[in-house]
Amino acid sequence: MSNENTTPTPAPESAQQTDKVSPFLTAPLPQGTPQGQQQSLEQRLTDTPVTGTVPKYNLPRGANTGNVGPTTHFGYQTVSSEEKAQKVAEVFHSVASKYDIMNDLMSFGIHRLWKRFAINMSGVRRGQHVLDIAGGTGDLAKVFSREVGPTGHVVLSDINESMLNVGRDRLIDAGCTNVDFVLANAETLEPFADNSFDLVTISFGLRNVTDKDAALAAMYRVLKPGGRLLVLEFSKPVFEPFAKLYDLYSFTALPLMGKLVANDSESYKYLAESIRMHPDQRTLKGMMENAGFQNCDYHNLTGGIVAVHRGFKL
Ligand SMILES: C[S@@+](CC[C@H](N)C(=O)[O-])C[C@H]1O[C@@H](n2cnc3c(N)ncnc32)[C@H](O)[C@@H]1O
């Protein structure tokens, strides 16, 4: 795989380049419902289905699947599913402009290595079609754009307009001419046709999604047979004393950094809480299997602070 810093990027094309309609969409852009956009209650209820029952998995007792009933969680708060989506939207509207610098600061730059590991696991090849869900500022999409080359195609997708705008500007500046930018909710992936991508990725996005089962089912739907899903996400540290230290760091340093750099401690408190509420490694693997993925496995990174899950649509 080529190195991000040494591979020359092609010169940016005209702005018109980004206005073309992707052949992988079922309808013209933009589609989906941007978070924070005003909608009628009826429309919101149709767009964001809430499952009333919790699917059964072959999972350890007490495992937190993160599934939604009438209520769900936003960090440690119990909220309605509607409220969660709105609150997640507020977090990412608020942090969008400082998102990249905060990522580097909070993880001491290690998020770059986690992402590199996930990209290496993706097996992406020239000419392939890649969908990066909850792609935000486009770290993964930028590398995929180069890896798939001019005959391939990448879609950077996110529900949040502020995050997607940062990603779009960044990738256009980097000359990524084979990327489309699409607002879409991971729970439905409505703009995308069935069986249309070789690779689907979601990096540090799944824990923010209210109905994770619906999202995994949608990812399965849009993958081509033979395609693979990669989920890069915070997970459960495997070594207990390390977990305590990590807790201390997350609940004190992160909100403080958020306050100092982004003038927003609450969003970073949510970050710490949402990490603790996210399904652990085994649970997420079970959820992927339940959505239809086969040959699922996962790799712990940095002692399980983060895990990359992989599954195939066969
Ligand atoms: C922590 S950021 C991750 C951004 C990027 N993937 C990365 O790894 O740096 C989480 C992203 O998930 C997006 N998100 C939250 N809920 C979503 C949903 N239901 N559908 C799609 N994206 C969602 C947010 O807008 C935000 O951009």
Image: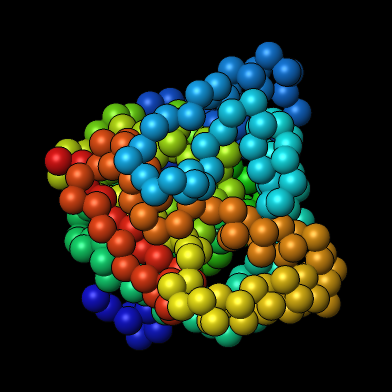
User: At which x and y percent is residue 65?
Assistant: 48, 44
Q: Is residue 121 above or below residue 153?
A: below
Residue in the foreground of this view, choosing between 173 and 103: 103
Instruction: Please count the marks in the image.
Output: 0
User: At which x and y percent is residue 122?
Assistant: 26, 62
Q: Which quadrant would the C terminus be assigned to in this image?
A: top left
Apparent side of residue 286 relative to residue 12 in the rendered image (left or right)? left
Residue farthest top in this picture: 42
Q: Which quadrant would the N terminus be assigned to in this image?
A: bottom left
Residue in the foreground of this view, choosing between 289 and 221: 289
Residue 177 appears anywhere in the view: no
Q: Is residue 122 above or below residue 47?
A: below
Which residue is drawn at the image coordinates 24% and 52% (left, top)? Answer: 296
Apparent side of residue 211 relative to residue 84 in the rendered image (left or right)? left
Residue in the foreground of this view, choosing between 94 and 125: 94
Which residue is drawn at the image coordinates 39% and 48% (left, top)? Answer: 60
Residue farthest front in this picture: 61
Residue 193 appears anywhere in the view: yes
User: At which x and y percent is residue 141?
Assistant: 42, 60
Q: Quadrant of residue 107?
A: bottom right
Residue in the foreground of this view, choosing between 42 and 5: 42
Which residue is drawn at the image coordinates 33% and 58% (left, top)? Answer: 309
Which residue is drawn at the image coordinates 40% and 84% (left, top)? Answer: 5
